[in-house]
Amino acid sequence: MRVFLLGPSKWLPEARPGLPDYLVEWLPADWKRQGADILWPLDIRRGLAHELEKEGAMATMMELWSRRPTEDRHDLFRRILVEFGTEHVFAYWPRDANLSGLYIELGVLGEKVKNREVQGTSLRIFPELGAAFFDPDQDRVIFRESGARTTYSLDWEGWGVRISLWSDYRTLRQMMVSRLRTG
Amino acid sequence: MQLERDPLTYLFRSDDARKVMAELRDGEPHLPSEVRRKLAVHPQSFRELVEHLDAYGLVDLAVQKGSRAERTPQGWGVKVVLQATPAGLALLEVLERATHDIADVVHRKGKLLPPATVERWQEA
């Protein structure tokens, strides 16, 4: 199983989310932490990828790849999708994070799905409760977003996108692992 | 939240989780609101049930076909459906066979068993 893990790298300015101590244990020994006093979303994403690797998956993230001399980030993104043989794209979507990069990545991915450049790759969004919530009586998942931001990154019409909401990191890990085992 | 390691154990312990899975036994997408109302589960409990079942990979919340993001007072909403996964359907089958077998043995050995056990499994 080949998983491409998307997600933010930084928290919002002034955000100090309470994080469980066990997240540090998920990091590979050779990983240089971004945050000194608190793990950053990039660190957590690396830890999640490492946990998926322990379960037998090949998990990657954009930050683990180097751009070739003529490559821009868009080209690298496409190379990971195609050359890496990405089967699953998992989007880690925590509260209190700077999500602007993730919005762009999902927009680029949506364009590639629409243009049939990417086929057979599943996309699953993993929002933390608080960043989004499930309203069963409206049959909706609602992503908390103020202002008049455009929604192209949420236009998942026709993608077969799945959404898994989580409230703690162990559950998030279990959700990702179970999806690797059962599809 | 620390879930049971084994989802089958979780399903045996949670009546509501079993009922949700039974409602999804056809493997087709269902509107969450219809499932919740049919089972008369409180919205917050239903959210937690879906989270647990999702954590085990037994159900999926999938974006509805043809649905676009819509502005709501609380943020951007996408319409979703609830569906059992193949793993969820397989586990439901295991659960129902096991339940049937236990009820059968309990019925046959009834006089030797504690009354509460007989009462519990007669309802199964």
Image: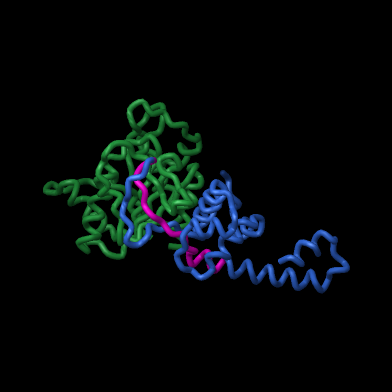
Q: Residue at x 41, y 49 (%)?
A: A141
Q: Which chain is blue?
A: B
Residue nearer the viewer, A130 or B35: B35
Residue nearer the viewer, A4 or A130: A130
Q: Residue at x 71, y 72 (%)?
A: B101
Which residues fall within the magenta stretch?
Answer: B74-91
Please tell me the colour of chain A: green
Q: Quadrant of the N terminus of chain B?
A: top right
Q: In which quarter of the image is the C terminus of chain B?
A: bottom right
Query: In the rendering, at what x and y percent does residue B76 appear?
Result: 34, 45
Q: In which quarter of the image is residue A78?
A: bottom left
Is-magenta flag for residue B13?
Answer: no
Q: Quadrant of residue A14?
A: top left
**Residue B69 left/right relative to B60:** left
Q: Quadrant of residue B103?
A: bottom right
Query: In the rendering, at what x and y percent does residue A63 appear?
Result: 28, 43
Residue nearer the viewer, A75 or A103: A103
Q: How is the image coloured?
A: by chain
**Residue A65 left/right relative to B48:** left
Q: Which residue is drawn at 26% across and 57% down?
A: A81
Query: In the rendering, at what x and y percent does residue B19 appear?
Result: 60, 61
Query: In the rendering, at what x and y percent does residue A18 appear?
Result: 47, 31
- How many numbered marks, from 0 up? 0
Q: Which residue is drawn at 31% across and 65% down?
A: A120
- Vertically, is A19 above or below A14? below
Residue B75 seen: yes
Is-magenta flag for residue B78?
Answer: yes
Q: Return the residue found at the far left.
A: A70
Residue A29 seen: no
Q: Return the residue found at the far right.
A: B111
